[in-house]
Amino acid sequence: MSVSKKLIPVPVVKRLPRYLLFVRELQDLGHEWVSSMALAEGLALTSSTVRQDLSHLNMSGVSKRGYLIEHMVTVLTDILGGTRRHRVIVIGAGLLGSAIAQHGNLERNGFDVQAVLDVNPDLMGTEIGELRVISMRNLNKVVEKKKIEMGIIAVPADQAQAVADALIAAGVKALLNLALVHIKVPKEVNITDVRVVVGLQELAYGLSQPG
Amino acid sequence: MSVSKKLIPVPVVKRLPRYLLFVRELQDLGHEWVSSMALAEGLALTSSTVRQDLSHLNMSGVSKRGYLIEHMVTVLTDILGGTRRHRVIVIGAGLLGSAIAQHGNLERNGFDVQAVLDVNPDLMGTEIGELRVISMRNLNKVVEKKKIEMGIIAVPADQAQAVADALIAAGVKALLNLALVHIKVPKEVNITDVRVVVGLQELAYGLSQPG
DNA sequence: TAGATTGTTAATCGATTAACAATC
DNA sequence: TAGATTGTTAATCGATTAACAATC
């Protein structure tokens, strides 16, 4: 049951999580339909962009009414991986790694943290939610046994590349990098960076501008 | 000592932190010069894009040698706010908020966490690094006294908008949102979202594609 | 000097916006 | 029916890439 017609352009994919968030909110408020204008208004886009974006999806609207919210939630959840469960591990049991491993938003959106690993022997066995920190030496075993699809890299910058290499060698094809270094990966591996400091840097640039 | 000639396009600004990361690495390795080709290679861009990007900066290269790494570090650090210190507060003393408040990368890049606030009375006084959690009721006072420029929103989704409104009312003009909701702000306020779940969702879409 | 690399102009590509006929 | 809203085509806008003269 694949959902997209062709291939969704990257800028559109990056907006999809925001659409999903917004229509879920409307759903909670009891709304049934949403127009491209309302979506545009809510997400600071034009209604034209909204209609173009949604045209990439397996979805159609109805004149005079707009789009059925329930259907949008279904379609978007499916594309964004929330329909089936994804099996994830976290590498790095520091404050950030353990905060993320325990964060309810992952589970709520289809991502199950199956294990937390670390190189530091002092941390072995530490409880993180319902998990216990295990050694990096178990990486291959864990990835294979638990059928891990994604790895979250939450280690210091100087270890991040090595961790990524190990994950890739173990067969993980999708990496989320929280470390403040550029990680090189072969082109068949997907990697996404998520970084608080970078967000602050963008804001700092914004603050420094007159406008 | 403003640095940019005109106004740097958003896609370029978003690449700047990656340039900075990369040239800092080269600097640590003892390199002195870097060419647009080397930068392109390192960041998966074309050398043409690199030269266009750098032309927005207060910087010029030298034929046959490239760009002086030390100068690039200076210029990029300056634009990205790392030259002067920025005063930041964190709202939300949960696992994520406290992990970020204590994360060394912020301080290292020019961002000083001056306080951590929370609504939950049970958390008041809890130690977070060298800080103690204080009540949201002190928000205005803290923002004014400590001259806070940026707020990091690390509260549950259903509280995020209210927190943002309070920050804005207190005079904070730049917000970093970690909560999984769309926050509405007046156009003179800058807001940037940083979200692990969204990163995972993008990866999930990538995994679902043939390529 | 010859060769490499910048800085910039022009060409291409792709994303956003506008416009409007189709339709509910 | 009249009016609102979609879906899509065409126009615009802006970002990326190519190309090349200037220069070290």
Image: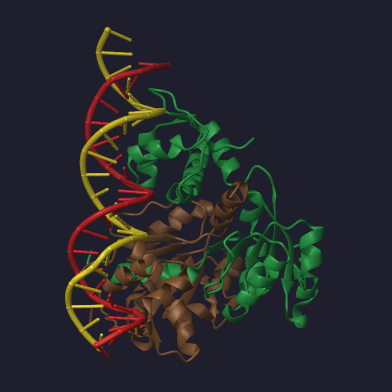
Chain colours: A brown, B green, C yellow, D red
Look at 53% across and 75% down and name the residue there: B181
Question: Relative to B6, does residue B172 appear above or below in the rendering?
Answer: below
Look at 62% across and 45% down and name the residue there: B82
Answer left or right for A94 relative to A28.
Answer: right
Question: Relative to B78, does residue A183 appear above or below in the rendering?
Answer: below
Q: Nearer the viewer, residue B112 or A18?
A: A18
Q: Nearer the viewer, residue A146 or D4?
A: D4
Name the image quarter holding the C terminus of chain B: bottom left
Quarter of the image where one finds residue A99? bottom right
Q: How many marks?
A: 0
Answer left or right for A201 relative to C1.
Answer: right
Q: Looking at the image, can residue A187 be seen?
A: yes
Q: Pinpoint residue A146: horizontal percent, then vertical percent.
A: 37, 78
Q: From this viewpoint, which residue is outermost toward the bottom?
A: A30
Look at 49% across and 69% down and name the residue there: B196
Q: Pinpoint residue B149: horizontal percent, then vertical percent.
A: 69, 56
Look at 47% across and 92% down and name the residue there: A30
Answer left or right for B188 relative to B7.
Answer: right
Question: Relative to A121, does residue D15 appear above or below in the rendering?
Answer: above
Q: Pinpoint residue B120: horizontal percent, then vertical percent.
A: 73, 81
Question: Relative to B66, does residue B127 appear above or below in the rendering?
Answer: below
Q: Looking at the image, can residue A84 be seen?
A: no
Quarter of the image where one finds residue A174? bottom left
Q: Pinpoint residue A163: horizontal percent, then vertical percent.
A: 44, 59
Name the image quarter holding the N terminus of chain B: top right
Answer left or right for D8 relative to A33.
Answer: left
Q: Nearer the viewer, residue B15 or B129?
A: B15
